[in-house]
Image (cartoon, grey):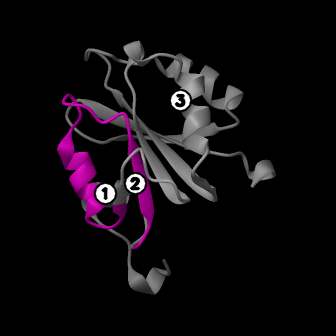
Amino acid sequence: MSASEGTPSGLAGKFGLAEGWVVQELGFDEDCDTSVSDAIASVAEIVSEDYDDVVDAVLLWWRDEDGDLVDALVDSLVPLADNGVIWLMTPKPGRSGHVEPSDISDAAPTAGLQATSTINAAANWQGTRLVAPKSRR
């Protein structure tokens, strides 16, 4: 998206998505905040876990008890475009299922990713932006 086209505002703008992007949503469950998905859907096409084409971004909802974060991140990379981004959505501190930042910073490099920023995405959820290091892109 060029600057002349403008950028999405509000919550959608926090994710840095562009009009027309395809975002695969993984790990969505009843505890997830639909306002996040709705905001993303206002600028991008959200597809399910069975989508079998390349995507521009992955929205991965993850809780501490969901299993091995490294495995989930590696699996999230499979459909991701070369310059794609993974938004790892985790419960905020003090919420059930909270994932310690150290767990994310340990898992990301093992999966070939680096965390670049964290956003306040919803009342109970925060998002960590993960990308492949520039040397790999």
Which of the pair 123/23 is nearer the observer? 23
* Residue type of the residue flagged with mark 2: Phe
Dot 3 and dot 2 residues touching (CB under 8 Å): no
Residue 103 is situated, as x and y percent measured from the top left of the image, at: 54, 18
Dot 1 and dot 2 residues touching (CB under 8 Å): yes
* Residue type of the residue flagged with mark 3: Ala
Q: Nearer the viewer, mark 1 or mark 2?
A: 1
Q: Residue at x 24, y 34 (%)?
A: 32
> Residues under labels 3 and 2: Cα distance?
20 Å
Asked if residue 105 can be seen in this view, the reply is no
Q: Earlier in the sequence, mark 1 or mark 2?
A: 2
Which residue position holds label 1? 40
Q: Nearer the viewer, mark 3 or mark 2?
A: 3
Which residue position holds label 3? 72
Which residue position holds label 2? 15
Residue neighbourhood size for the residue with mark 3, other residues' Cα within 10 Å, grouped as few (<14), some (14–19), many (≥20): some
Q: Which residues are magenta?
A: 20-45
